[in-house]
Amino acid sequence: MPENFSVDTLFNHARSQNGFQNTPVAEDVLRRLYDLMKMGPTSANCSPMRVVFLTTAEARARLTPALSPGNVAKTASAPVTALLAWDTRFHAHAERLFPHNPQLYRTFADNAVHADRTAFRNATLQAGYFLLAARAVGLDCGPMSGFDEALVNETFFPDGRYRINFLCNLGHGDPSKLFARLPRLDFNEACRVL
Amino acid sequence: MPENFSVDTLFNHARSQNGFQNTPVAEDVLRRLYDLMKMGPTSANCSPMRVVFLTTAEARARLTPALSPGNVAKTASAPVTALLAWDTRFHAHAERLFPHNPQLYRTFADNAVHADRTAFRNATLQAGYFLLAARAVGLDCGPMSGFDEALVNETFFPDGRYRINFLCNLGHGDPSKLFARLPRLDFNEACRVL
């Protein structure tokens, strides 16, 4: 499995997939994906992202009722669908994640708005690392935000501790299902240099 | 400038920097960073991230009053400080970003809560791509969320259209200022396979 993918492979040549080939993904590949992703930086190392990998037809069937109609077929074709979520009580890991100063995490435990914002921001940053790490271990991604958040939370996180962020199909893409590449904003449209 | 950085370089060996060497960063490098970052996927290609690169002492001085005390010296040492922000009116680019179906962006224009959530989520995903793209073009990063958001917004985005997400120093790190690597959660702590 290639782990020296070029920057072109991670950024320029990879495409969001709308269908997948019928090739399985070993759990070992998911573990290598996680072990790369986890190294990306988060605020005070808070690492709030949690992932549920759906790898069986039975597990995927629990998700299907929550999907937007346009996301059903592509998800059915994917060997793995990842639920990218966050832990609302990420600060319970203070001793584990910030051992030299676990008291710092009291600012989260004592302020729910600050904790929510921190969890959502940093879990989403980690989701960005996740997509690129998936490509780095040779997988194609199909991220999706078209789904019923409340229903996913009820179905997979009934105790309320984890909350869904978005979904990502993983596998080896079917090039016949790709759409044309969409334009991006130019540097001068999105950036200023002062 | 290396653009075939190994996965190890992007994920495993890179470190968040607390001080920078006195070496400049050319605008061309910032443009290459952006041109990689922009290729990462966002929901319906909405691409809401906006970046202000502070490259002069004068520009950086406008930021200093908003920084937490612990972030002042490291920011003063950095040749570039990026303000990673988002465009609250990202959906104004519907024709440019989603030319085959610009009407889709009406769902954002008509629902401010949905637009805010989409902008924050996707701009933060792009911030994740930004940090890894910076490493891919040979830069070290020092992301920071310790600052006064309202003051940064007032100072740099007085018309209210853009909003700050977080800050990131860029340059070539001073290894003498690094802290020890912090632990990460194991796969079995952060992930489940169903």
Image: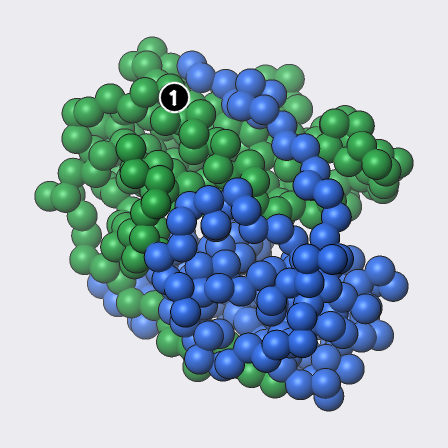
Chain colours: A blue, B green
Residue A58 appears at what percent x and percent y?
Answer: 73, 88
**Could you tell me which secondary element the residue under label 1 belongs to?**
helix
Residue B95, above or below A95:
above
The quadrant in which the N terminus of chain A is found is: bottom left
In this orientation, which residue lies closer to the viewer: B49 or B11? Answer: B11
Residue A145 seen in render: no
Quadrant housing residue B31:
top left
* Residue at point 61%, 77% (across, down): A23
Quadrant housing residue B107:
top right
Q: How many marks?
A: 1
Residue B11 appears at what percent x and percent y?
Answer: 34, 56
Residue B11, above or below B129:
below
Question: In the drawing, does residue A180 fall left or right of residue A185?
Answer: right
* Residue at point 77%, 82% (across, down): A61
Question: In the drawing, does residue A158 fall left or right of residue A86?
Answer: right
* Residue at point 24%, 22% (across, down): B24
Name the residue furthest bottom.
A58
Residue A3, above or below B193:
above
The quadrant in which the C terminus of chain A is found is: top left
Residue A110, above or below A24:
above
Residue beneath disc 1: B28
Residue A36 appears at what percent x and percent y?
Answer: 38, 63
Task: Please state which amino acid type lies under the numbered disc 1.
Answer: Asp
Please give the chain letter of the residue carrying mark 1.
Answer: B
Question: In the drawing, does residue A94 fall left or right of residue B121?
Answer: left
* Residue at point 46%, 44% (across, down): A8
Name the residue furthest left.
B176
Name the residue furthest front.
A176
Residue B27 seen in render: yes
Question: In the drawing, does residue A138 fall left or right of residue A42?
Answer: right
